[in-house]
Amino acid sequence: MNDQQVRQQIQQMVSFIRQEADEKANEILVKAEEEFNIRKLSAVEAAREKIRAEYEKKNKQIAIYQKIQNSTELNAARLKVLKEMDAELQALLGRALEELVTISKDKEKYSRFLHDATLQGLIALADERVVLKVRLEDAPLLKAVLPQIEKEYTSKTGKKVALSIDGSTFLDEKSAGGVVLSSNEGRIVLDNTFASRLNIAYEQNLPVIRTMLFGGSCMCMIFSHHAEQIKIVLRRKLKLVRKVARKLLVQLASSRQCRHIRCDM
């Protein structure tokens, strides 16, 4: 083999080696690019997943905050409405008590009330000696009917009773009136004043009065509307209804059929 052939063979070998090197380099580049793309895609997907998770977390936080906010506002509205309803009821109670004061100014009616209230209290106490406390101005009225009360008590119960009017302490002159009975040396006290009877009539008939003033569905509305919307309902026809409810309380408090009286021991 001459020199020319040797050089030619060497050149072929070099070309072959270079070709293999180029192919290997290309293969490495392709593989590297594929790995880069895979890692890039994975990193992008991980970033997207992180963003989605944060977005969902923030959405849940916003939803929870909105629920808390709505609940807070609704509770505030409920409390506001309940406060206004209670204020309306207390005002009604005050006006009813004022109207009861006018009854005590009618001497004939009031004398009859003192008679009935005292007799009712005596039957409830069922004691032999009872002390009666009234307003100073009412003492003569009650004293005038004491014999009749004692007689009727004996007729109804078959028992005798000794009555006396407390001359040392009296009910407040500014009160609506009525009578407080005590026995067993003051250890048993029965309050049968207008104020006490009115409170009892109010407590016993509160559901009816609420319905009269605010309507049967008012409490349901409190849990579904805001205070300003409910105000419209509360004010509807209240003037007439207030008068009816007040008359009911006054009638119950001054009626001889009112048997539920408060007794403290």
Image: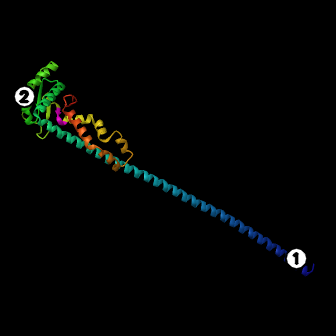
Q: Position of residue 72 (x, y in %)?
A: 38, 50
SS for tag 1? helix
Amino acid on which disc 2 is placed: Ala
Q: What type of secondary structure mainly makes up the magenta span?
A: strand
Q: Where is residue 20 in the image (x, y as percent from the top left)?
A: 79, 70
Q: In this view, does 130 lie above or below 221?
A: above
Tally of numbered tags: 2
- Measured in 3D between alpha carbons, the distance from the residue under mark 2 to the one under mark 1, in whole angstroms, is 154 Å
Query: Which quarter of the figure has residue 203?
Result: top left
| Label 2 packing within 10 angstroms: few (<14), some (14-19), many (20+) | few
For the C terminus, which image quadrant? top left
What's the residue at 57%, 58% (across, down)?
49
Earlier residue among tags 2 and 1: 1
Q: Is residue 25 above or below residue 68?
A: below
- Disc assigned to residue 144: 2
- Disc assigned to residue 258: none
Residue 194 falls inside the magenta stretch: yes
Whether residue 102 appears in this view of the structure is yes
Residue 26 falls inside the magenta stretch: no
Relative to 228, 123 lies left or right: left
Q: What stretch is highlighted in magenta?
A: 191-195
Relative to 258, 37 lies left or right: right
What's the residue at 34%, 49% (across, down)?
227
What's the residue at 13%, 20% (across, down)?
154
Relative to 74, 52 lies left or right: right
Amino acid on which disc 1 is placed: Gln
Do residues under tags 2 and 1 come within 8 Å of each other at their CB atoms?
A: no
Relative to 245, 29 lies left or right: right
Name the residue beneath numbered marker 1: 9
Q: Nearer the viewer, residue 115 or 37?
A: 115
